Image (tube, grey):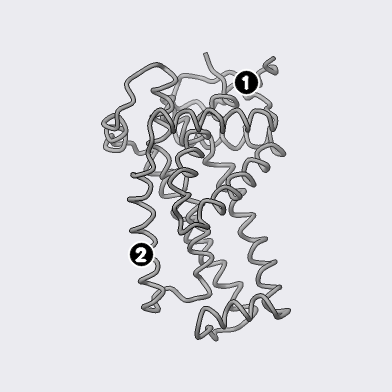
Amino acid sequence: MDPSPVKKLSAVDDIPAFGDIRKISAADLVDALAKGVDDFKAKPSHLVILAIVYPLAMVVSANIAAGFIPLSLVFPVLSGFALIGPLVAVGLYEISRRREKGLDISWKHTFDLIRRPSLSFLILSALLGAIYFIWLGVALAIYWEIYGSTMPRSISEFVTEVMTTPAGWTLIIVGCGAGFLFALVVLAISTFSFPMLIDRHVTVATAIQTSVRAFLANLTTMVLWGAIVVGLLLIGAIPFFAGLAVVMPVLGHATWHLYRKVIWHS
């Protein structure tokens, strides 16, 4: 049984209206994941994800080896990619949208969506990019505050220092706390905004405001969703990132179905 809606979504672009926002539970998260798995089975995208993940991992590794990325920023750089995940999943949202409507789900429609000029997509993408680089700046500032400008000479030295000293534990606690706050911000502004921009002809301001309102209306459930996302990404990354080829598409498709559960419109 669907809960009562909050406010009607306007079809007019420049009116800052919100959708009919539903309250959801943990059971809805499980159902969204199940539907995400079904979408992935119907349109596997693991090769596409591998074609993105492994070259990116090679670039990051090369920059670490060359010293362009300090060892103190390796974890923030890698973990921060989750902040821009909603942007990467745009094509998956479109596949799920088309499959839901019984339309053709060939990849050409995804590429059409990517090529279609949209100021709203550019603004939202730039916002996520800015948050990512601000996160890196904050992570570096935290390190400098605790350790000063001295950088570790090797990965093993850095890991030992972080895991076995009070300063290292402080770095973990403060760094993870700051990362958690950044993740909450991104979760609030982007979980429903990207799917809404695909689904509805609305402004980026309307999409973001609706996403934040929906997030706050389902705060506990959405924090649980964020924990599920992080947990699955960690599991997927363990076997040389290979698991991400399945985890990332499933999460992308599931996010679309989560949007459809939370933001209702006729």
134 left or right, relative to 159: left
- For label 2, the residue is 58
Q: Which label belongs to residue 112?
A: none
Report the front residue among 155 and 12.
155
Residue count near mark 1 (Cα–Cα under 10 Å), binned few <14, some 14–19, many ≥20: few
The amino acid type found where label 1 is placed reads Lys
> In the rendering, at what x and y percent does residue 36 appear?
50, 32
Q: Residue at x 58, y 24 (%)?
A: 261
Residue count near mark 2 (Cα–Cα under 10 Å), binned few <14, some 14–19, many ≥20: few
Please give the count of numbered marks on the rendered protein: 2
> In the rendering, at what x and y percent does residue 44 appear?
38, 35
Residue 69, above or below 9: below
> In the rendering, at what x and y percent does residue 180 appear?
64, 55
Res. 104 image quadrant: top left
Q: Residue at x 45, y 40 (%)?
A: 249
The amino acid type found where label 2 is placed reads Met
Which label's residue is closer to the chain start, 2 or 1?
Answer: 1
Q: Residue at x 60, y 37 (%)?
A: 212
91 left or right, relative to 184: left
Residue 136, above or below 228: below
Residue 97, above or below 48: above
Q: Residue at x 62, y 24 (%)?
A: 21
> In the rendering, at what x and y percent does residue 114 appear?
31, 38
Report the front residue among 107 and 196.
107
Secondary element type, mark 2: helix
Secondary element type, mark 1: loop
Quadrant occupied by the N terminus? top right
- For label 1, the residue is 7
Q: Residue furthest front?
A: 239
Residue 150, above or below 83: below
Which one is in front in this view, the residue at disc 2 or the one at disc 1?
2
Disc 2 versus disc 1: distance between alpha carbons? Answer: 47 Å
